[in-house]
């Protein structure tokens, strides 16, 4: 039996909402509506594409416990008004969910299982519900505990070693310890992220990428602080270690709401869109690491993805590295001495833009695609650390 040839996979378009802050401008919007909004935007921006040609919609969602309604991808298809014949599947790789969705959709197209797909991610951390476990026996007389599903560990299996289940912020502190990263270095990295994001917005670099949600006044990312400075960052107290801590709210990514999506096609699908692609999918990789050192997950994933693509750090035009914490970002950068830091997050990162968990990976991939299109040619990389110890990376080319 002859194995079919692997097909080229192209990204035709990428769109996202502005990223809202926790309890902010998008807090009243359900996650399935956020997802439907970006799906609809992609279809509307590609009028030559018959929506019945969409073979699948793949969405990442890190929570799923509330209005995501288990399969938010299918909900988004229906709410966006797409034909009921268009299916939808939701994937969960925690913070990497949105990028995982892009990779899975690209893989389906490369193998001939699909010709046209939409992939993306969504999260409403503001609307994440509390959950209550069922009692072990009927008619309990005592109090029951509610668990927040907003972020982090919950209902931890007692078989898990304690060192694995530290908070995400303590994990960032461990990386700062491991690499000798100071509070000042973290604050300076965070400040640069805000400055780059503010500059990019002022220059109109996000105009072709961001589609404001109908009914919301939010037209740009809500957490950017263009007036931040080292003095104001320095006044913030450590959030996870009271004594000797270096990780603060100012050098950690905020809690956020938002959605992002990409339109992926093969050659036949590309002709159906009548559009020029932004970029081509080249390679991807996923790796695991000790759970408490989750922030260093991208180190090996990036190396493997670049090797698969036949590329090196010197080939990169742009690199979108998710900034979960300044400490973990700096820890990763320290492991890549051949990387030119000027290509990393040139339009700002998650410390400023925000980190709506399930959406972030799709935001990164879409941003890389738009940046490559603006440059005309080059190689781009998107990568994230993932809670519980994983790393995920995607290489795009143009």
Image: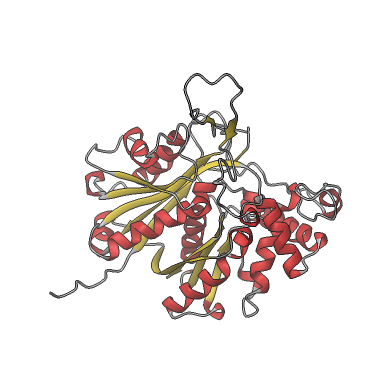
Q: How many marks?
A: 0
* Percent x, y of residue 298: 56, 66
Report whether residue 346 is seen: no
Colour option used: secondary structure
| Residue 335 in which image quadrant | bottom right
In this picture, is 160 found above or below 318?
Answer: above
> Looking at the image, which residue sits at the far front?
137
In this picture, is 43 found above or below 245?
Answer: above
Viewer-proximal residue among 129 and 351: 129
In this picture, is 340 found above or below 124?
Answer: below
Report whether 230 appears left or right of 36: right
* Percent x, y of residue 76: 37, 38
| Residue 276 in which image quadrant | bottom left
Residue at image point 37% right, 42% down: 73
Residue at image point 54% right, 28% down: 28
* Percent x, y of residue 357: 54, 47
Residue at image point 78% right, 57% down: 187
Viewer-proximal residue among 212 and 357: 357
Report whether residue 247 is seen: yes
Report whether 224 appears left or right of 151: right
Viewer-proximal residue among 249 and 375: 249
Picture quarter with the C terminus: bottom left
Residue at image point 22% right, 73% down: 5
* Percent x, y of residue 142: 60, 21
């Amino acid at each position: 039996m002859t194995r079919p040839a692997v097909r080229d996979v192209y990204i035709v378009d990428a769109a996202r909402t502005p990223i809202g802050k926790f309890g902010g401008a998008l807090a009243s919007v359900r996650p399935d509506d956020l997802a439907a909004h970006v799906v609809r935007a992609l279809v509307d921006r590609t009028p030559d594409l018959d929506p019945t040609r969409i073979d699948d919609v793949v969405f990442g969602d890190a929570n799923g416990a509330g209005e995501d309604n288990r399969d938010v991808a299918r909900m988004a298809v229906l709410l966006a008004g797409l034909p009921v014949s268009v299916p939808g599947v939701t994937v969960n790789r925690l913070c990497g969910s949105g990028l995982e969705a892009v990779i899975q959709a690209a893989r389906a197209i490369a193998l001939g299982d699909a010709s046209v797909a939409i992939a993306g991610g969504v999260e409403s951390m503001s609307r994440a519900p509390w959950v209550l476990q069922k009692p072990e026996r009927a008619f309990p007389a005592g109090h029951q505990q509610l668990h927040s599903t907003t972020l982090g560990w919950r209902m931890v299996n007692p078989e898990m070693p304690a060192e694995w289940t530290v908070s995400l912020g303590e994990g960032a502190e461990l990386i700062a310890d491991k690499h000798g990263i100071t509070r000042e270095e973290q604050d300076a990295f965070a400040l640069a992220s805000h400055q780059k994001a503010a500059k990019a917005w002022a220059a109109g670099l996000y105009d072709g990428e961001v589609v404001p949600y109908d009914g919301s006044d939010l037209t740009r990312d809500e957490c950017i602080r263009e007036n931040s400075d080292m003095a104001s960052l320095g006044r913030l107290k450590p959030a996870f270690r009271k004594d000797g801590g270096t990780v603060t709210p100012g050098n950690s990514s905020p809690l956020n709401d938002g959605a992002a999506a990409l339109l992926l096609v093969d050659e036949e699908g590309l002709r159906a869109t009548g559009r020029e692609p932004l970029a081509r999918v080249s390679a991807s990789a996923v790796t695991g690491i000790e759970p408490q050192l989750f922030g260093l997950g991208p180190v090996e994933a990036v190396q493997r993805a670049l090797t698969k693509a036949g590329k090196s750090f010197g080939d990169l035009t742009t690199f979108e590295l998710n900034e979960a914490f300044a400490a973990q970002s700096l820890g990763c950068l320290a492991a890549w001495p051949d990387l030119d830091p000027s290509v990393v997050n040139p339009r700002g990162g998650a410390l400023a833009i925000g980190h709506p968990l399930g959406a972030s990976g799709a935001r990164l991939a879409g941003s890389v695609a738009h940046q490559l299109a603006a440059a005309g040619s080059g190689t781009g990389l998107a990568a994230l650390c993932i809670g519980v110890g994983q790393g995920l990376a995607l290489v795009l080319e143009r």
